[in-house]
Image: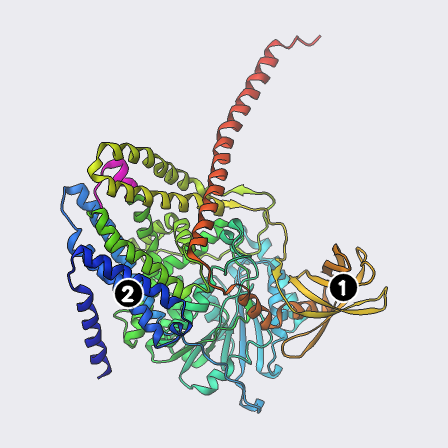
Amino acid sequence: MTCLVSAALLYGFCALAEIHLSIEKQYLVGWVCVVLLILFSRVESFRQPPLRIVFILLAVFVSIRYMIWRTSDTLVYDGVLNFIGTTLLYLAELYAFTLYLLGVFANIWPLETKIVPLPDDPSRYPSVDILIPTYNEDVEMVKITVTAALHIDYPKELLHIHILDDGATVAKRNDPTSAKEAWERHYRLRRIAGELGVNYLTRRHNSKAKAGNLNHALAHTGADLVLVLDCDHVPTKDILKNTVGQFLKDEKLAFVQTPHFFINPNPIEKNIDTLKHAPGENEMFYRACQPGLNFWNASFFCGSAAILRRNYLEEVGGISGETITEDCETALSLHQKGYNSVFIARPMVCGLSPETFDDFILQRSRWAQGMTQMMVLNNPLFAKGLTFYQRVCYFNNGLFWQFGISRFIFIIAPAAFLLMGLHVYFASGGQVIAYALPHMVASILLADFLYGRYRWPFLSELYECIQSIFLMPVVFSVFLNPRKPLFKVTPKGKSLENDFLSRLSVPFFLMCSILILAFPVGIIKWFQYPLHRDVILITLIWSLYNLCLAMAAFGAFYEKRQIRRNHRLWAKGHVLVYFPRLEKRIEAEVQDISASGVGLLFRLPVPPLPKERIRIESRDSLGEICQVDAEIQRIVARGEEYFCGSEFTAVSGEERANVIRFVYADSQRWVDYWARNTVRTNPIKVLGFVLKMSLKGFRISMIACLHLVIVPVIDLLRNVRMRFSAKVAPNDI
């Protein structure tokens, strides 16, 4: 009955949106709806259901009217080439509109799952295996994660930690080209496992990559639950206390996913310097999208920071390995069996983003390939066992990663009209203002309404523009051969000695050249074709926007020097600092923190000294006290107030374990960091930021071009001079 009522309401809604209106009445309808959206967005009650749905439907109504008009009035046959261009642009818009509707559906009613406390009786607790797969990552990184796992607040007799070393398999140790490195890794990790009292596992070969590594471990372990942690994902001590209770509450629960929190910015955030002001790029997914999927029982396993029920995992054959996104594929298999999932929106691991743009693209290419594989090999629309809502959500997850194709078409379409005269959009300026502009404004308002606290407007367009050229070919390759992609580990923990422009910027030089060339051609056409000035003006503005995005991308390609091995992160909280020299204990405010040190702000009657030893005592959000020793390295004085950058003095043993506990154990620290930038910002302000970044990108691109021209000329002159000097030099006597 509910489905019939929903279908009837949907039919009525679409029929209302389909009503044909004169252009004057469409002006009124479109822009009145936009004004209402602006007014409603300022009313807090509209952000909560059911008024939230009213806002969403009003925005969708404007967009549906646009797409109906776009389909019925603008698809005109005007020659073969024009028709191809028109069709490609229309299909790109249709794809974007479909993704828009699917995204709205998936995020219509986000569900924040409450933490279920564990019972008082520990005998009811399930046993837990912590699996930490590693391949070629820094051994010290693995050690930090294992050390933090030892501090997890859970009965020790029920907790079993395993290092899964896929970088020192028997095959690698027997391969002459990799034997030395593999044996060294094998011995180092085994020694760490022995020192820390955890289990070390490896296997004969690397078949099925990470999925095969985890499945090998599942065959050699036997706890009730499995916590999977990437080797750079350092867990907080409360990760099991906040998640295991869900399994006791729901017998059909297959897994609990928690957010991936990153201590360092990804290359785009670092290079264009947004992390200080804007939410992190991954926050939109973990703070908006996953809670939306959670409502439909469709949140999915993300490869790490998740707890899975072993018997259900074994029922579906372990971790799936048909695609290179083994995590989402595994979740799909579990949901097909009718089991449940839960997403808890509290960050309880701290990991590393890729440090270089090349590695960032490698990671995103793997995600794009894997999710496209799922679309082709396990199309969720026809997968057995899923509910209708789960089908829609999984289809949305997979369809998203083809955005590179549509984004590329949106970039070249206006330039194709201006440079080649290719008619790709048959509409007058008045129709664009009546239909297209209200749709664009309503879409921006809805995106800000749904995700504004976690993603600034226009930044998504910038991210998509930057990735589009690189993801488009890898997605096409999957459609041509869906079983070809291989799992590639994303490198973590790299350092950069110098600033440089990434080699991946080369395609954007060509793109920017085409877009810049379109402007003088467009201005000439403005005078040549006065009857088409409205269309020419629209395409010029469109090209200018594309050029701003493409130029801003150069800021992302300009890799900034990164020599710090341990990234510092904004942090807050209060600690007690003891100065042995003064025999004085004072309260200090934490400013930033990393695995190697902490920034402190405090007042002191006498100045602190460089290299002065101090002892820091903290009490975390759960009341546990931790003490660490440090040495002051940098001092900034403001009267009697001092900011001191200090470095931990612990190198190994229990002291180092205390440092890891001090830095990573308290999940409230990551929650506080997430809360630092959750205020919605003005879309106009963000557009100004993109324009500013485009000017910076223009400067970077010009310097790079001059470098490409001047350096070879200087080398040529130097060679000519040397040859000339050699010819005129007197003979040796």
In the displayed structure image, the side of residue 227 where residue 149 appears, left or right? right
Residue 301 in the image, given as x and y percentages of width and height: 43, 70
* Residue at image coords 30%, 52%: 406
Say whether residue 650 is visible. Answer: no
Q: Is residue 422 magenta?
A: yes
Which corner quadrant holds the N terminus? bottom left
Which mark is on residue 60? 2
Residue 695 in the image, given as x and y percentages of width and height: 47, 42
Proximity of marks 2 and 1: CB atoms separated by less than 8 Å: no
* Residue at image coords 79%, 55%: 610
Which corner quadrant holds the C terminus? top right
What secondary structure predominates along the stretch shown in magenta? Answer: helix
Residue 25 in the image, given as x and y percentages of width and height: 19, 59
Q: Callout 2 environment at 10 Å: few (<14), some (14 to 19), or many (20+)?
A: many
In the displayed structure image, the side of residue 328 where residue 60 appears, left or right? left
**Disc 1 residue type?**
Arg
**Disc 2 residue type?**
Val
- Badge 2 marks a residue whose secondary structure is helix
Q: Which residue is mark 1?
A: 603
Q: Callout 1 environment at 10 Å: few (<14), some (14 to 19), or many (20+)?
A: some
* Residue at image coords 38%, 72%: 46
The foreground one among 726 and 583 is: 583
Q: Which residues are magenta?
A: 414-424
- Badge 1 marks a residue whose secondary structure is strand
